[in-house]
Image (cartoon, rainbow, N blue to C red):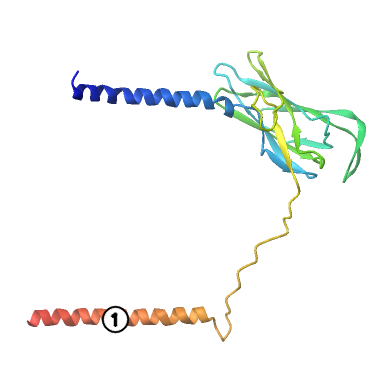
Amino acid sequence: MNASGTRSSLLRRLPVAGSLAAAGVLLLAGPAFAHVTVQPGTAQKGGYATIAVKVPNEKDNADTVKVELDLDPKHPLASVMPQPVPGWDVKVEKSKLDQPVKTDDGTVTEAVTKVTWTGGKIQPGQFQQFPLSVGQLPSDADRLVFKALQTYSDNDVVRWIDPSMPGGKEPEHPAPVLKLLAKTDDTKQAAPAPAKDSGSGGSSSDTTARVLGIAGIVLGAAGVGYGVFAGRRRTSA
């Protein structure tokens, strides 16, 4: 085969190789984006937050028809309120605590331990978010670990319960995690820019701008006059 034929053959193969490489990247990246997660992934310690359980459908031939979320029993939450999701029914289960928990609203003897959503469908290639208002978040923990069960219409149940260790290899079905951050000082704000003086004295910057503007107009007029004068001299010559 001559050089021209070799070059043409290589050019024909490049799009195929690029497509295969892109497909390989998607296959490798796909599972990382298909986990059940908590959004946003962080909240402030000791406060209240609105989070959402994000559930993607990993299958091509079945719908997600049920989502169960088990809360961390080590850090019970006194308040867990789900936001209605169109097409889905929600059930909130409470359990009596072994030890009462003191909150800003008083002592709590029971807490929500499980939330279940049923009745709806998450079709292939889609995801659904299930919002929750939660609190009071613990002040003595760095994260809350949830356990989620995802049931499909073919009766397959995916258990998102594997623990994730910081710095370790991510498990196949990691449990959703809400990271808790220390309280921040939100009182510090940037100082506002000084207002311009609109009094009789005016602002020196405004005066300078006016002077420069007038000078520009004068120079522009002089340039036009010079151009007209030069044109007349060329015509008369």
State the residue at coordinates (77%, 44%).
Answer: 45
Question: Residue 97 is drawn in which quadrant?
Answer: top right
State the residue at coordinates (63%, 27%).
Answer: 35
Note whether 194 is above or below 178 in the view shown.
below
Question: Residue 41 is drawn in which quadrant?
Answer: top right
Is residue 125 visible to us here? yes
Give the percent coordinates (x, y) of residue 131. 70, 35
Q: Which residue lies furthest to the bottom in this view?
A: 200
Q: Residues within 10 Å of mark 1 (few under 14, many from 20)?
A: few
Residue 158 in the figure: left or right of residue 10: right
Residue 106 in the figure: left or right of residue 122: right
Give the percent coordinates (x, y) of residue 46. 80, 44
Residue 208 in the figure: left or right of residue 86: left
State the residue at coordinates (82%, 36%).
Answer: 77
State the residue at coordinates (45%, 78%).
Answer: 209
* Number of residue marks: 1
Q: Disc 1 residue type?
A: Ala
Question: Residue 210 is drawn in which quadrant?
Answer: bottom left
Q: State the quadrant of the N terminus.
A: top left
Q: Name the residue under label 1.
A: 221
Give the percent coordinates (x, y) of residue 198. 57, 80
> 47 or 110, which lies in front?
47
Tag 1's secondary structure? helix
Note whether 46 is above or below 188 in the view shown.
above
Is residue 86 visible to us here? no
